[in-house]
Image (spheres, rainbow, N blue to C red):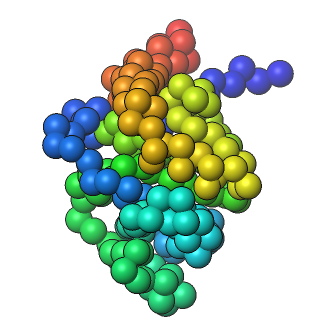
């Protein structure tokens, strides 16, 4: 019988802004803290499964795995096609250059800030349903949402369709601006605090 209010995470849309320069061709990106096991699982899946299958369809596909503390098993996956950066001072340059942000998370919980940040920067997103849990992204409009088996097809579609990339970029950014910018989140806190203080 409790009156529960759920307030989502937010994004600084001035810091995470749409880049003006063109994106690199056929570059996939995944970011995360690799001390978190679900991120390691997702990164391994990208490097060992999604990239090789993608290269069979789009030969130039490459991948950036960006983030803190990649374990030796992840570092060992580095190759001509896969770059494992380790911790970086800022993820925005990678989000600004990638063709597609791919989030193949299979387990874990919570709203994924990494997905909100990619959407904010207009980076087209391909994600599993778990990756966008709690984010009001519509499949085919704001992002492509695919189960594990459909990820390669979804990634290939985005890489090969410039019009789709543009649509996902614009709609993803608009979604963040209208629903997830810090100003809206702060207003919801202000309303809640005012109600509680009455």
Question: Residue 129's quadrant in the figure?
Answer: top right
Q: Residue at x 53, y 50 (%)?
A: 156
- Residue 38 visible, this angle: yes
Question: Residue 93's quadrant in the figure?
Answer: bottom left
Q: Position of residue 53 (x, y in %)?
A: 59, 66
Q: Nearer the viewer, residue 41 or 152?
A: 152
Q: Nearer the viewer, residue 15 or 28?
A: 28
Question: In this figure, what is the number of numbered marks?
Answer: 0
Relative to 118, residue 195 above or below: above
Q: Nearer the viewer, residue 177 or 47?
A: 47
- Residue 176 visible, this angle: no
Left or right of 49? Residue 82 is: left
Q: Residue at x 27, y 40 (%)?
A: 16
Relative to 81, residue 164 above or below: above
Q: Position of residue 111 (x, y in %)?
A: 57, 44
Question: Residue 174's quadrant in the figure?
Answer: top left
Relative to 97, residue 164 above or below: above
Query: Which residue, as the protein is rendered here, is positioned at the far left?
Result: 21
Q: Residue at x 62, y 35 (%)?
A: 134
């Amino acid at each position: 019988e409790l009156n529960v209010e759920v307030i989502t995470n937010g994004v600084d849309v001035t810091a995470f802004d749409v880049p003006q320069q063109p994106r690199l061709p056929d570059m996939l990106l995944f970011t995360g803290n690799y001390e978190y096991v679900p991120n390691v699982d997702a990164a391994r899946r990208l490097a060992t499964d999604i990239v090789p299958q993608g290269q069979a369809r789009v030969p130039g596909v490459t991948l950036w795995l960006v983030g803190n503390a990649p374990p030796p098993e992840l570092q060992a996956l580095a190759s001509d096609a896969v770059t494992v950066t380790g911790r970086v001072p800022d993820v925005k340059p990678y989000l600004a250059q990638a063709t597609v942000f791919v989030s193949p998370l299979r387990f874990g919980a919570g709203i994924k800030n990494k997905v909100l940040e990619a959407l904010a920067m207009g980076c087209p997103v391909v994600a599993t349903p778990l990756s966008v849990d709690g984010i009001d992204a519509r499949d085919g409009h704001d992002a492509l949402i695919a189960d594990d088996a459909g990820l390669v097809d979804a990634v290939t579609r985005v890489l090969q369709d410039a019009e789709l990339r543009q649509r996902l970029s614009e709609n993803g950014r608009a979604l963040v601006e209208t629903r997830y910018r810090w100003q809206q989140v702060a207003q919801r806190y202000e309303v809640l605090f005012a109600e509680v203080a009455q």
